[in-house]
Image (cartoon, rainbow, N blue to C red):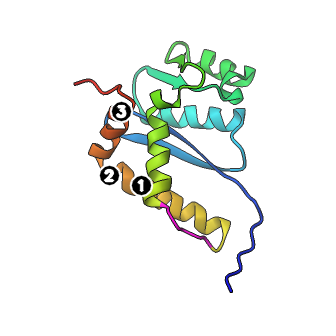
Amino acid sequence: MLQYHLNWKTLSAMAGVTWWNFYFRLFPGAIRSPQVILFLAHLLCHIPGRLLIVWDGLAAHRSGAVWDFIRQQRGRIWIEFLPAYAPELNPVEYLWSHWKQHELPNFCPASFGQLGQQARAALRRMRRRPSLVCAFWQQANLFPL
């Protein structure tokens, strides 16, 4: 008999994809404005120059706190929104799909901490494969040929 006790904690993930790399952060719980701001700050520390951020319709992306943070960056961050109901245009959606289907299938963690460790390790493995990251753009039909 197989028994597994779940406590329904949530591990949320955010990612930003460049042409050949991606950046990610994992957060316990749901993603809200503070997590979006932390992730934007993370990107600003790791990517020089101006950033074009393409977002879906997550409510946290439209919050006043997030827009205040963006304004404080004095033009370093430019925001564009994906059309509603168009996840196929978002390369990050292909990243998550690969992560779940190829890196973490059938993984049954013993704890929330183990889930976080395994999820991070899988994302780091994926990041070392630039051809995989390029494939996310190709799947979204956004890769420049």
Height in image: 8 above or below 138? below
- The residue furthest right is 7
Give the CA distance from mark 3 to mark 1.
18 Å
Q: Which residue is mark 3?
A: 137
CB atoms of marks 2 and 1 within 8 Å: yes
Q: Which residue is mark 1?
A: 124
Height in image: 69 above or below 47? above
In the image, residue 141 lies at what x, y percent? 35, 27
In the visual, does 65 lie left or right of 137? right
Kindly identify the amino acid type of the residue bearing the numbered disc 2. Answer: Arg
CB atoms of marks 2 and 3 within 8 Å: no
Q: Residue at x 66, y 71 (%)?
A: 111
**SS at circle 2:** loop
Q: Residue at x 67, y 82 (%)?
A: 2
Which circle's residue, 3 or 1, is located before the other in the chain? 1
**SS at circle 3:** helix
Q: Determine which of the numbered discs, if any, sits on residue 128 in the image.
A: 2
Which circle's residue, 2 or 3, is located before the other in the chain? 2
Kindly identify the amino acid type of the residue bearing the numbered disc 3. Answer: Trp
Kindly identify the amino acid type of the residue bearing the numbered disc 1. Answer: Arg
What residue range appears in magenta? 104-109
**SS at circle 1:** helix
Local crowd size for mark 2, using a 10 Å CA cut-off: few (<14), some (14–19), many (≥20): few
